[in-house]
Image: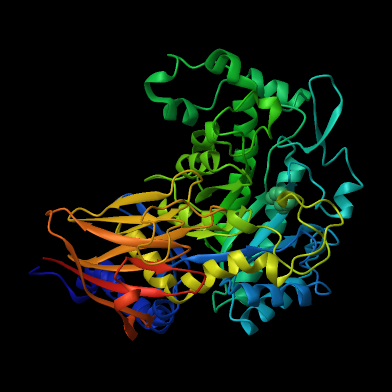
Amino acid sequence: MPGMNLENKITSFRPLILAVLIVLLSGLCTGPARAQADNNPLPHLVTENGRHALIVDGAPFLMLGAQCHNSSAWPAMLPKVWPAIEYLHANTLEIPIYWEQFEPEPGKFDTSIVDTILKQAREHNVRLVLLWFGTWKNGSSHYIPLWMKSQPDKYPRIIGKTGRRVDSPSPHAPPTLAADINAFSAFMRHLKEADTLHTVIMVQVENEPGSWNTVRDYSPEAQKLFMAPVPPELLKAMGANAPIGGGNWSKVFGANADEYFHAWSVAHFIGQVAAAGKQEYPLPMYVNASLRDPLKPGSANTYESGGATDNVLWIWKVAAPAIDILAPDIYQGDTARYRKVLKLYSGPDKPLFVPETRGEGAAARMCFAALGQGTIGWSPFGLDYTKYANINTNRPPGAPRETEATLAPVALNYKILGPIMREVARLNFEGKLQAVAEEKGEPTQTLDFGNWTATVSYGVSPFGYGGVAHGNSEPIGRALIAKIGENEFLVTGAFCRVDFKAASGGQRDFLRVEEGGYEKGTWHPLYIWNGDETDWGLDFSSAPQVLRVSLGTY
Ligand code: DGJ
């Protein structure tokens, strides 16, 4: 720039100088902060090749969870929670945070219970999933603070078709939305400050939202919205199925209009609550769903309408993009329905997480079915030593509380999986793992690994006597097999026999079978299985045993 004076030169370089300064300064400011973040990154979800992982402390993490009873999060009850969690070998406790406790007066937040739970979880070396019992709890709003309950006109319930109020919060009430956003934001803000260690790895927003006893809200405000055009985002998601020019809910969705409208309304409300919370502190967030029958759904007035049932997952995704996972609470007793639910709630755009399920007896084996479907966590409900008996486990009110005996089937899962949970989460994320749960009437299952097929048999006679598998008298078998090398497998399970067949047609040879465990990602063999322990296949009983198996042919 010949002929420019110094002042002009400086002026023309000013933007460049500024940019350099910003880069230098930001380097200075964020250097240590970034280093700290890298050492202790925020729990987050990742998706690669259509598979998902929850990253905790920088690596895939498998939540081996237990959810306590609804009223067990009070400090007086916690001493009855931790011993159960310890006995279970759970690595994650799911526990509610009650809005009524957290905000006893408008705008005044009581963080004492959150802090107590955080402290005690750390003492027990257990991670937390905190459940925000906010506007919705099982379709009602019984956890809103007293100061809200006493103003039912300001924070209204919905109105059913006959004009009667239904015990379910209105998703069309701006004061309720504002209050929930305010409280949930305060909660997440506090977590950010109080939990720099990332003890909390996920947050559930509301609990089984939706409405029982009415398909939607018929209040005047709702009617107005129902007659208004369907939101353009939803039409866009419908692609070619959207009618040209859109229209109101009835025009676009016909017989499904009421249900879809309610799903949109509930999801849109919760999406805003989650987004506000994430602005404070962006932990992974999910919504749990009370399910409809996955095989014979029936009409929307037979299940909780508006929640994330399988038919409206697509609406939830559009209406609540801040929600990372739509998660099924699986109380289905029969395995055909259980497996169907696992399929419906998983996929390349759907990370699977089972936040509530049954854990008693043979039901515990379904943890392995969920793992086979790629789940990032599995967590039965009501596993603590408080007196309340779990109504979902066929035990009548007043039945004895959980004992070590009733918890044992889940404890066995976690004793098997706990020591290898990082490997299991990683291998599942990499698509190398298959896992199965026994099915009644199906004494063998085969798993295809390309050059090898694994056979899992249940109810086999010891050694080779009798030869055939009959199935266990109760279907309690479970197995997990991961391909960790061309001819190498990680194998574990319970109440089953595992064997392999070569695709080449050669006869299987157990070259080396090591029992052992991983420490910080490194395999440590304890001893070698041979003779009776391998001659008939690899037998797993009720002992937690993990094998590394090298195969050959002859
Ligand atoms: C499902 C709910 O999400 C839980 O909070 C609890 O109410 C159980 N049902 C009841 O067993």
Residue 204: x percent and y percent? Answer: 62, 56
Side of 532 where 224 appears, left or right: right
Quarter that holds the N terminus = bottom left
Viewer-proximal residue among 381 and 525: 525
Side of 390 where 435 appears, left or right: left
Side of 299 where 221 appears, left or right: right
Residue 332: x percent and y percent? Answer: 61, 43
Side of 419 where 548 appears, left or right: left
Viewer can see residue 145: yes
Residue 474: x percent and y percent? Answer: 57, 53
Of all residues, the one furthest to the front in this rendering is 465
At a point 84% along the width and 74% down the height, the residue shown is 76
Image position of 229 with respect to 3: above or below: above
Viewer-proximal residue among 117 and 242: 117
Residue 318: x percent and y percent? Answer: 49, 37
Quarter that holds the C terminus = bottom left
Quarter location, residue 512: bottom left
At a point 75% along the width and 27% down the height, the residue shown is 214
